[in-house]
Amino acid sequence: MDKVNSSLVKFIREARKRGFDDVHIRSPLLKKGWPLEEIEAAFASITKNKKEYCFKNKVTLFLDNKILRIIEKRANKNLLTINEQIEDILRRSCLNAKTTNNKAENLDDLLISIFSRKKK
């Protein structure tokens, strides 16, 4: 495809300004019959040479109200949105998991490790 559809590019930019993410922009365009190649070319032309925009995967979480209030308080304290705070918690958790020593202990009986008082 040589030329990018300017009306499609304008639509995508306007949708992004209104807060829609790429997943919620692509889906209705595909349902309305826009060719995938044309949609991808329009997205590529917008994000070409722009490092500030990156695609994020979507995850849906169902949280207890009590937990949500705790996260909301922490987010306010850290001057973050709730989504940013949850992302920060997950990122830190992943980093901590990478740095912990995951070597298996050499034990005669694996039940010893389960009932041991040693902190994991």
Image (cartoon, grey):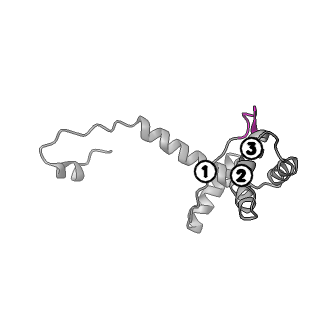
Of marks 2 and 3, the one in the foreground: 3
Q: Which mark is residue 57?
A: 1
Of labels 2 and 1, earlier in sequence is 2
Q: Which residue is outermost to the top?
A: 49
Residue bearing the label numbered 2: 22
In the image, which disc is placed on residue 31?
none
- Judging depth in this view, the residue of 59 and 87 nearest the camera is 59
Quadrant assignment for the N terminus? top right
Of tags 2 and 1, which is closer to the observer?
2
Vertical order, 84 against 51 (above or below) = below
Residue kind at label 1, given as amino acid type:
Asn
Q: For the point 61% across and 55% down, which residue is it?
A: 58
In percent of width and height, residue 16 lies at 80, 51
- The residue lying at 55 percent from left, 43 percent from top is 91
Magenta segment: 47-53
Q: Would you name the residue on which mark 3 appears?
A: 41
Q: Where is the C terminus found, in terms of image quarters?
A: top left
The kind of secondary structure element at disc 1 is: loop
> How dense is the environment of label 2, judged by Cα within 10 Å: few (below 14), some, or many (20 and up)?
some
Q: Main secondary structure of the magenta part?
A: loop
SS at circle 3 = helix
The residue type indicated by label 2 comes to Asp
Q: Is residue 40 left or right of residue 61?
A: right
Q: Position of residue 26 (x, y in %)?
A: 72, 56
